[in-house]
């Protein structure tokens, strides 16, 4: 029997959905029952766990890799490679995990505790430049390692024998167990990774897997790939689908047509396609805590000015964007952290308690804009808005361009729509003025969002910095880590600061929309993690 437990600490995911599919659509049954075809919303950027930060890469890692735990449909944890549920000792600073003895890599090597040790050390090593390293902030010696004051070998993770793992933290971290279900914490086979060197994770043939599937037919840049059943997976007898064929769907209209014709069995959709399919019984709306936002490069002269950033925030009509432009079950953004995180002590939703931190106000936007230009010694301004080149994003680009140029005098906005991987690379390198992006959580705590804008965070692409914000996050993560009330207050204060100082402009709280065949069973989508295809079957 699989044991389940609630995530310990401050916050649990508020929303959960039991989706033992399928829907009641009238798609014809497929000829075979061991293969499915699905759509993806963006291209795959990497198959390297240490680098897989975006949603598509994380999704792929969930299918072809496995860590200590998985998320359940309710956002709780269940055992994967660990045989015991997480329990802290030593005042919340030590965790001991016993591993399965029958787990193997796709080359037949056993998965051992040392594979976790190597993976974690590699990810936090500054030489790796991993955007996921910060998930280990709080593990013993992490800060000193990232500051290059200590070796990655001193990280607080140790293999005791072949199948026991001990993790030591600098301080108690209420949300730490849920990090262990995130792909950043998954193991890596040191011998294989070091043999492949820089080629590791760059295509399917230079990557090793320990999940239910292996990745095949991906050359590193192709818009399609395949999950093939892993013959070495420890639970392979319960994996019913042998192959999952994935194709990137840049056009939402095409995605809808491909689904209706039976060429796709599952596909994400957005924009007009959601509106068009609102009465389709195959439509599934997954409510997740997520925010789409406009992030500013504060190293650029224009966006170094707080009033300029605030002006754009007040010029944003989030309600109109979500309800009238997108019409895809998105909702009005009232601040940075979205709805969906509840205080385990009081039951209060984080975003609802925060209230409306910023709202549409054209008069205030114009005033702040003119004041900001004056402070910068400018009479007019222009910037380039970078985004991905998909249908839904194009609508947002055009709406924001028109909204901002109309509300803010002497402003010119240029749109630069690029392939997803190009946008991601430019964002990480800081080569942008303003970029349209977003965030969905990997663990059930507001810090999953708020940590992103801490000074020096690898995902703080716009180089935002605010001393009081950093202090509030430090107090929440360290000083008040075990005091639920004080920690919650710290996080609320930080949310207000990052929203009011406009580190980014919240555009809308998002949802995910899928068309799913009625013949697809066993697919579970909860508020956290990615859909797991290993449990899927046809009927």
Image: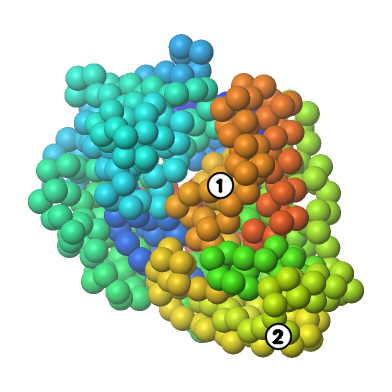
Q: Is residue 263 left or right of residue 309?
A: left
Q: Is residue 118 left or right of residue 312?
A: left
Along the viewing direction, whichever of 339 and 215 lies nearer the viewer: 339
Q: Which residue is mark 2?
A: 380
Q: Is residue 412 visible?
A: yes
Percent x, y for residue 52?
A: 37, 55
| Above or below: residue 23 compared with residue 368 | above
Q: Residue at x 55, y 70 (%)?
A: 300
Along the viewing direction, whichever of 191 and 466 lies nearer the viewer: 466
Q: Nearer the viewer, mark 1 or mark 2?
A: 2
Q: Residue at x 41, y 29 (%)?
A: 139
Q: Is residue 68 visible?
A: no
**Hey, which quadrant is residue 412 in on the image?**
bottom right
Q: Residue at x 73, y 84 (%)?
A: 379
Percent x, y for residue 53?
A: 42, 55
Q: Which residue is mark 1?
A: 454
């Amino acid at each position: 029997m699989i044991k389940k437990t609630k995530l310990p600490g401050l916050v649990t995911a508020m929303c959960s959905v039991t989706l033992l599919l399928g829907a009641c659509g009238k798609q014809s049954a497929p000829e075979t029952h061991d293969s499915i075809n699905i759509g993806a919303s963006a291209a795959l950027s990497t198959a390297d766990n240490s680098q897989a930060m975006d949603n598509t890469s994380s999704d792929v890692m969930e299918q072809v890799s496995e860590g200590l735990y998985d998320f359940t449909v309710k956002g709780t944890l269940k055992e994967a490679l660990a045989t015991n549920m997480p329990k802290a000792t030593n005042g919340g600073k030590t965790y001991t995990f016993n591993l399965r003895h029958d787990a193997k890599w796709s080359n037949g090597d056993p998965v051992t505790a040392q594979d976790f040790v190597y993976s974690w050390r590699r990810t936090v090593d500054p030489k790796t430049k991993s955007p996921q390293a910060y998930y280990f902030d709080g593990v013993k010696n992490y800060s000193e390692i990232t500051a290059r004051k200590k070796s990655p070998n001193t990280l607080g993770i140790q293999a005791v024998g072949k199948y026991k793992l001990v993790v030591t933290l600098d301080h108690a971290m209420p949300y730490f167990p849920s990090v262990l279900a995130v792909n950043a914490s998954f193991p890596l086979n040191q011998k294989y990774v070091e043999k492949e060197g820089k080629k590791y994770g760059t295509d399917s043939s230079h990557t090793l897997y320990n999940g239910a599937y292996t990745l095949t037919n991906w050359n590193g840049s192709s818009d399609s790939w395949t999950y093939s059943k892993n013959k070495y997976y420890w639970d392979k007898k319960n994996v019913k689908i042998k192959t999952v064929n994935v194709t990137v769907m840049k056009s939402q209209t095409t995605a809808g047509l491909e689904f209706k014709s039976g060429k796709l069995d599952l596909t994400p959709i957005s924009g007009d396609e959601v509106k068009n399919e609102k009465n389709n019984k195959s439509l599934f709306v997954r409510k997740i805590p997520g925010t789409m936002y406009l992030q500013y490069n504060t190293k650029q002269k224009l966006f170094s000015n707080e009033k300029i950033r605030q002006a754009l925030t007040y010029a944003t009509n989030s309600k109109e964007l979500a309800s009238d432009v997108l019409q895809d079950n998105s909702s009005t953004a009232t601040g940075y952290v979205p709805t969906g995180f509840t205080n385990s002590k009081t039951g209060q939703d984080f975003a609802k308690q925060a209230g409306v931190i910023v709202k549409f106000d054209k008069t205030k936007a114009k005033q702040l804009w003119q004041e900001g230009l004056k402070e910068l010694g400018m009479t007019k301004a222009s910037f380039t808005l970078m985004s991905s080149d998909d249908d839904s994003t194009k609508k947002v680009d055009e709406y924001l361009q028109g909204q901002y140029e109309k509300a803010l005098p002497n402003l010119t906005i240029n749109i630069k729509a690029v392939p997803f991987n190009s946008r991601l690379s430019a964002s990480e390198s800081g080569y942008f003025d303003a970029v349209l992006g977003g965030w969905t959580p990997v663990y059930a705590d507001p810090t999953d969002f708020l940590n992103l804008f801490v000074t020096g965070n690898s995902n703080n692409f716009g180089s935002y910095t605010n001393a009081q914000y950093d202090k509030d996050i430090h107090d929440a993560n360290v000083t008040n880590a075990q005091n639920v009330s004080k920690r919650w207050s710290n996080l609320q204060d930080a949310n207000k600061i990052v929203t009011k100082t406009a580190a980014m402009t919240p555009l809308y709280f998002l949802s995910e929309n899928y068309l799913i065949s009625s013949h697809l069973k066993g697919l579970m989508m909860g508020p956290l993690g990615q859909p797991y295809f290993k449990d899927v079957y046809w009927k």
